[in-house]
Amino acid sequence: MDSPEIHRPRNLDWPRASALLFGDWGTSKAYVIGLAFVAAGFSSFPIIVAVCALTALVGVNYMVICRVFPDGGGVYSAAKQQGRLLAVVGALLLVADLTVTAALSGWAALSYLGVPEKWILVSTTGAILLMGVLNFYGPRHSGSLAVALALPTVIVVVLIILFAVPHLTFTHMEPLHDNFQHTWVSFVGVILALSGVEAIANLTGTMKPDRGSVIGHPQVGRNAFKAILPVAIEVSLGTALLGWAMLSLPKELAPEMIKRKEDMLRFLAEQYGTMNFGPGFGHIFGFIVGVVFALLLLSAVNTAIAALIGLLFMMSREGDMPRAFTKLNSHGVPLAPLGISVGLPIIVLLATDNFEALAGLYAIGVVGAICVNLGCCTFNRHLKMNVLERGLMLFTFVLLVAVELTLAKTKPDALFFVICVLVIGLGLWAYAQRLSGTRTLTVSKEFADIVRPDVVEKMSAPVSETQKILVSVRGLTPVLRFAFEEAQMRNAALYVLYIREIAVLYGGGAAALPKADWKNDPEASAILGTALQIGKHRGVTTIPVFVNAPNAASIIVDMAATLGVDYLMLGASHRGSMSKLLRGNVATEVAGSLPDNIQLVIYG
């Protein structure tokens, strides 16, 4: 049966959510201003300011989306309320976005480390493969590096701006030379600062509820606002000021600036460090900035791969991708999505083999996904938004539709890329629908309530036992035998918990803790079915509990508290040292979070 009244633990506070968002969204400035300079030279400042304004506008809209979707408001969740096909299209656009994000961020990271251009392609491929190996063990620590680097990144950005302040000038800037059409195309071509904004909408499913929220009906609007606001300000204001600093450099440096477009912030650090404190300091400061941004960009690669794995897995669980995508390795990571998430960015790298071509592929995916999300929310009358919020969202939606159409017209490679993703993805979707063989029947609500499987299960819950024992099992281990002996001796009800660990990084509410029937899981069926037979033989009331979850420790603690058990029993861990390092020790985490009134027994 499904776990009784269990909800995914909400333990993500707004500072950490903000840092995770910054680790994705905040990387955009690392390459936006350089590409803007390539597009319009010393007349690019109005374009940079316009990109920053659009970034802030989208951030405001996502504050609303996070409020109205407290269980995950990414494009897949929002579009599903309007139609299954639309949800799949939106998700595939996000697949295109995450694919190029991984490739582009990896390329920029190696550029900031000073890797020679002839080795960039090979080294970026190696970095993506390394991130794939790390994600083989699950994304448990995927966001940790981004969180750790958030403060150093802000510090070096502030230092670059402070060093540039004495030298800021408008004298080097030039007016826009082209007509509106050419200026619009240039503006559209550098809209990369929207990267990562979808991340915060997907995190609301694990975000701590606002104070005063009712259990079962969480509200995260205030916490989401506090998480988004500082990042939106930093990205928008920081990018504008860094663009001003870039355009305050002498025009004689223009050829070098074009050459250093891929690591422009390191170039600015070197130049302004030298102007203020000499060449030695400039070189050291540039190196420090390069390392900080390289690590942040590599973290963005890792996060993009992990998010892509989670998105493909979620679509498979929802029946929109082949069921083979749900097959997990021993660490709970879906194997097919892992291979796709590593392979796609490498294919894109090999097909483009230069930074500007990668940037050209990028925006069409992220803008398309945001368009679908905003459009679905705008026309969804069931969402609680006031007239101003809905009008602002409609305006942003129309603006981004114009951007998307311009990208489709002016960047044929990007259009070809996203069409390939859509064609292959929709083909897999049609194949999954054909294999599922499911039929949808419409019945009355009263009849559906009667035949719900959980009704019968709940009616058989124990009522006479004086104590409750919860045992978490990974197999038919000695701790299960010990739990039956204790339950028999104490006349206690025994809850046998089997957790199918799913190590994916995606915040959609329904998919983050997907419901499942243990009878349809071969391993769970063998273990829980045997436990039921043993319980019947021993005269112990045995209740099987099956949960899909990304974090076993949190679910065990949550289940123990929800059921109000007297004893929690765990088997001793026999994981290898590498697995413990990357995934942690479940018993240690449970012991640190378990309520004092529940006794923990570790057997073995």
Image (spheres, rainbow, N blue to C red):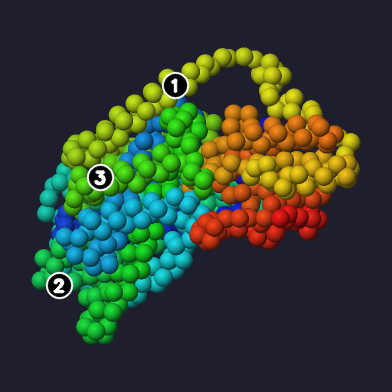
Amino acid at the residue labelled 3: Val
- Up the image or down, 500 lies above or below 316; here it is below
Dot 1: element? helix
Residue 181 seen:
yes
Q: Position of residue 403 (x, y in %)?
A: 27, 41
Q: Nearer the viewer, residue 581 or 258?
A: 581
- Up the image or down, 521 lies above or below 355; here it is above
Q: Which residue is mark 1?
A: 435
Count of numbered marks: 3
Q: Which residue is mark 2?
A: 250
- Mark 1 nearby-residue class (10 Å; few <14, some 14–19, many ≥20): few
Residue drawn at x 24%, y 63% is 111
Q: Nearer the viewer, residue 320 or 475?
A: 475
Residue 7 seen:
no
Question: Rounded to the nearest whole Å, what is the CA distance between mark 3 and mark 2?
Answer: 36 Å
**Who comes first in sequence, dot 3 or dot 1?**
3
Question: Rounded to the nearest whole Å, what is the CA distance between mark 3 and mark 1?
Answer: 30 Å
**Who comes first in sequence, dot 2 or dot 1?**
2
Compared across the picture, whether 279 is left or right of 481 comes to left
Residue drawn at x 36%, y 64% is 295
Compared across the picture, whether 95 is left or right of 468 comes to left
**Quadrant placement of the N terminus:** top right
* Label number found at residue 348: 3
Dot 3: element? helix
Judged by depth in the image, the label closer to the viewer, 3 or 2, is 3
Question: Rounded to the nearest whole Å, what is the CA distance between mark 2 and mark 1?
Answer: 63 Å
* Label number found at residue 403: none
Q: Nearer the viewer, residue 273 or 345?
A: 345
